[in-house]
Amino acid sequence: MTVAAGIGYALLAVGPSLSLFTAVISHKPFLILTLLSSTLAWLMSLIALSAVWRAFLPFKTVSFWPAALLILTSVAFQELLRLFLWKLYMRMEEMLDAFADRVSKPRLFITDKMQIALAGGMGHGVAHAVFFCISLLTPAFGPATYYVEKCSQMPFFLVSAIIAFAFVTIHTFCMVIAFNGYSEGSKMDQYFAPVVHVAAGMLTLMNLASGGCMIGIPLLYCIAILTLAYCGKMVWTRLTEIRSRQGDLY
């Protein structure tokens, strides 16, 4: 392939996130700091997980269960990290609200809180894309491409970019859903993120079957669309409720 192809794969993986960053996050330095901190935290978690599992790789069996176990343990670890980041965020919110009270400024609005969660989720998604896609693209800038036997219909780099884009979408908006669930005590929102995360991870196992990518990738995008739709509905409901309460006060 060429340089254009390599850049195209990278933009496919993180281009939409770059657009969202430009439109929402780039105007607020605090959100940029949140995004960078989140990306670093998730990258470190992925590196730690890979170091642990490196001792057991490569698997000496062709069955799917070792890969499934790897995915389950990785998801469990990352969901625990999400909860830990939520607790850090709550402490940070308390500090920001206390500072706002001291300087007679308004506290964080619900939209501010959602944008912070969005930045944190985007950090998770970008870390995933960097770890599982961008880091693999160096050969894509050369004069040829690469196919794998199990998914010979598409170049390996294209498959990686397409899957990375789906996971960026899932991770970005799952963070908004999860943070809202923790804040409001909504069990549905709290369970949505880990269930979707596990489901998306398990769907990638279809890539191990011959031609499985042609089924697994569309199903993965169904989950990404479901996540986006659920997040949009949740945000709309929260904002409508808050506006209704404010209207009652007047």
Image: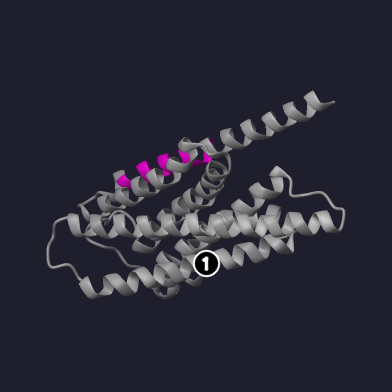
* Magenta-colored segment: predominant secondary structure: helix
Tell me which residue sits at (58%, 67%) in the image.
Answer: 37
The quadrant of the image that shows the N terminus is bottom left
* Front residue of this view, candidates 155 and 119: 119
* Front residue of this view, candidates 140 and 56: 56
The quadrant of the image that shows the C terminus is top right
Residue 119 visible in the displayed image: no
Which portion, as a residue range, is magenta? 216-229
Query: Quarter-wise, where is residue 248 in the image?
Result: top right
Residue hosting label 1: 7
Residue 138 locus on image (x, y percent): 43, 75
Q: How many marks?
A: 1
Q: Residue furthest top?
A: 248
Query: Quarter-wise, where is residue 133 in the image?
Result: bottom left
Residue 225 locus on image (x, y percent): 48, 40
Badge 1: residue crowd in 10 Å (few <14, some 14–19, many ≥20): some
Is residue 32 covered in magenta?
A: no
Is residue 221 covered in magenta?
A: yes
